[in-house]
Each structure stands twice: as C-alpha cells, then as structure tokens.
Image: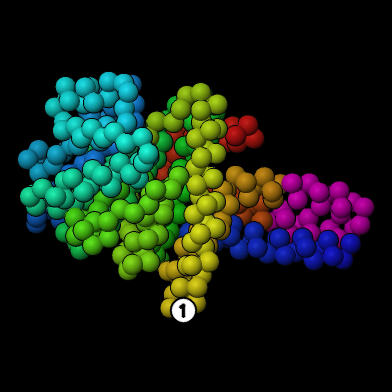
C-alpha cells in the first residue's frame, strides 16, 4: 500500500504541474490586449494557399469568405492547390476566379507535400509576394485577417499563427466539444504564452510566413501533424512564431460523430508521434540554452489532451473516495485529487470567461462525458 501511495503522489505531482501550468496560462491570458490600430505603413503582398483534396462541397464557401477580406484586392492572390482531386474541386475554384494549381502524385500524398509543391512553384516565379498564408479548405476567415498579418509583418515578425477556432454547430455534441477544446488549446493557452513572450505553435489553419523564412527554411514536414512539426523545426532554427489573435479562422468540423472520432484519432496519433520525436530534443535544448522558451515547448508536447487529464483525475477522485472510506488516514489523497480537479475546472471556466462564451458553448460542457 505504501508503494501505491508513492505512485499516486508521483502521478499527482506530474499531472498537477501540467494542469497548474495550463491554468496559470489562462490567468495571464487576461493581461493581453488586442491591437486596435493596425500598422498600415506598408501593404505587404500576400499569396493565400488553400490545399484541397476532393473538397467540392466546401471550397466555394471558403473562397467567398476570402473574397470578403477588407484589404486591397491588388495586394493578395488566392491559389487553390487541387491535390490528387477526383471531383470538381478544381473546376469550382477556377469558375470563382482564383488560380488553381493541379497536382497529381500518388506516391507523395498529403497536405505537407501539397504545400511544399505549391510554395516552390510560386517562389520560382518573379518576386511579387512578401508573405504566404495557408487556409484550410473548409474555413471561414475574419474580414481583418490580412490587416492583422500585415500589421505584425510590419512590426518585424516573420512567422504568424491566427486564432484557429471551430464554427458553432449547436446540438452536435462532437463538434461543440471540439469547439471547446480548440478554444482552450488554440486561443487561451497561446494568449497566455504571448503574454510571457513564448512561442506559439503552428496549427495548420491560418498560418502566415514571410517569403524570406520559406526561402531560408523550406517546408519540410510530411507527418500526420505536419504543421506542428514544421513549427518545431522553425523554432529549432531560431525563428519565433507569434500569435496574431486578432485574426480568426473558423473550421467546420464533421457533422457525423464517426468521422469526427476518426479525425481526432488521426490528430492525436500524429501528436504522439511528434512528441516522441521532439520532446527530448526540446528538453535538451532547454537545458543547454537555459531557456524556458524551449522548456515550455517540451511541456506542451508532453501535456495530454485536457479532457484525458480530467477523466484521469475524476477516476482517481472516485478511487480515493473509496480508499479514504476504508482507510481514513489516507483521506488526504482524496483532497489532493479533488483540488487538482477544481484547478482543471478553473482553467476551463477561465477560458469561457476570457472569450465571453455564448450560451451554446456553456451547454457543450454537458457533452464532455459523451466526447
């Protein structure tokens, strides 16, 4: 029993550090103020890339959304990378007046290969763009998106990530639970990191790169979570990824829970693969450089999904309720696990308060057990 108690304390300490740190990020996120007056001293020229594989049902909505951006039309151009498409994605995009780059390569499939191919094609042309933006094919984009990116580029930042959130679908437990998760992972924690001067991770949707960065460090990731890996590569090579929270992209999650579960499994498997490869690398760099910036990335890589942490904590609260009843002198373990659970709940509600969440997002809390 002593060994079990020691094991519990070790687990409690490890998970406690991770949850407390996430909650701390949520607290300091309230200190970050949005930019209201954007730097328009220079209008940077943007190439917007939409990688698309058989997206005929959603590609038009995304293009319409991009055409609604409030930015000089002459200073941005939309490219759809029709990657190994067997449907009408390319035809629909072409009819809507955007440039279509058709790619067919059965051996090298996936978003990473498509982006590298598309970037290389445009970079070989005459130098007409200052920055490249990546938007997923099932997204809506805030009207200020390029204004925000232009502002931060003018401030000297070279790699940017916008707020990457999920479109509301009230009543759909899978999509709404994912919306809550994206809020915490893609907005609240990055905002806290921004306050501390730390790096933002790339999220795949709503990314912006200066052309100089892509020439210096070409896209070189083909993993399931290629965006996360490329961001880590950039940081290891000395680039800083800045959070441009004033710009938003909203992705539409699958309506069918079966498809959503499959999608989440791919994300988590890809994240596990990246964590196994890079967590030790960043820990080594943190110790060598004596840098919390690198340690923070290591912490982020080893932190399990928030919902998994909460399920694990609830399980130990229940087990220790029984354990404490049988051995009252061990009741302190129950209170420690309960305190950790309360800290996790605080992190969750801090995020909801930070974004002034709508009532449907609060309702999504009821879907967490199903999720």
Q: Number of numbered discs present? A: 1
Q: Quadrant of residue 265?
A: top right
Q: Is residue 158 visible?
A: no
Q: Which residue is more in the foreground, 51 or 162?
A: 51
Report the side of 361 relative to 205 (left or right): right
Residues rendered magenta in the picture: 315-339
The spot of residue 71 in percent (x, y) is 13, 41
Q: Which residue is more in the foreground, 348 or 48?
A: 48
The spot of residue 191 in percent (x, y) is 40, 55
Identify the residue at image location x=13%, y=42%: 76
Report the side of 181 relative to 31 (left or right): right
Identify the residue at image location x=54%, y=58%: 276
Quadrant of the rendering where the C terminus is positioned: top right
Residue 299 belongs to magenta span: no
Vertical relation: 175 (above or below) 71 = above
Report the side of 144 relative to 18 (left or right): left
The spot of residue 245 in percent (x, y) is 32, 50
Quadrant of the rendering where the N terminus is positioned: bottom right
Q: Which residue is mark 1?
A: 288
Q: Which residue is more in the foreground, 301 or 10?
A: 301
Q: Quadrant of residue 79?
A: top left
Residue 331 belongs to magenta span: yes
The spot of residue 181 in percent (x, y) is 50, 42
Q: Is residue 123 visible?
A: yes
Way the structure is coloured: rainbow
């Amino acid at each position: 029993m002593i060994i079990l108690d020691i094991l519990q304390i070790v687990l409690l300490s490890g998970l406690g550090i991770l949850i407390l740190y996430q909650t701390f990020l949520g607290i300091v996120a309230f200190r970050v103020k949005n930019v209201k007056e954007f730097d328009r001293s220079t209008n940077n020229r943007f190439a917007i890339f939409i990688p698309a594989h058989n997206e005929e049902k959603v590609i038009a909505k995304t293009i319409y959304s991009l055409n609604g951006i409030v930015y000089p039309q002459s200073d941005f151009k939309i490219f759809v990378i029709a990657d190994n498409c067997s449907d009408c994605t390319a035809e629909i995009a072409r009819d809507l007046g955007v440039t279509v780059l058709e790619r067919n390569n059965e051996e090298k499939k996936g978003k990473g290969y498509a982006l590298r191919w598309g970037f290389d094609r445009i970079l070989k042309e005459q130098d007409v763009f200052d920055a490249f933006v990546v938007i997923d094919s099932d997204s809506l984009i805030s009207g200020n998106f390029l204004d925000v990116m232009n502002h931060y580029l003018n401030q000297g930042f070279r790699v940017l990530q916008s707020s990457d959130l999920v479109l509301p679908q009230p009543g759909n437990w899978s999509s709404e639970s994912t919306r809550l998760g994206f809020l915490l992972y893609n907005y609240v924690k990055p905002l806290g990191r921004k306050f501390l001067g730390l790096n933002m991770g790339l999220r795949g949707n709503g990314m912006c790169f200066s052309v100089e960065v892509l020439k210096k460090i070409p896209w070189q990731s083909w993993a399931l979570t290629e965006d996360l890996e490329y961001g880590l590569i950039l940081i290891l090579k000395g680039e800083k990824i800045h959070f441009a929270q004033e710009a938003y992209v909203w992705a539409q999650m699958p309506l069918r829970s079966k498809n959503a579960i499959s999608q989440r499994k791919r994300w988590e498997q890809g994240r596990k693969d990246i964590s196994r490869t890079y967590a030790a690398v960043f820990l080594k760099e943190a110790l060598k450089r004596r840098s919390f910036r690198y340690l923070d990335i290591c912490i982020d890589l080893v932190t399990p999904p928030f919902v998994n942490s909460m399920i694990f904590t609830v399980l130990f609260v229940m087990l220790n309720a029984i354990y404490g009843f049988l051995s009252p002198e061990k009741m302190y373990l129950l209170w420690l696990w309960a305190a950790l659970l309360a800290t996790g709940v605080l992190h969750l509600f801090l995020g909801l308060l930070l974004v002034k969440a709508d009532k449907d997002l609060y309702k999504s809390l009821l879907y967490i057990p199903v999720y």
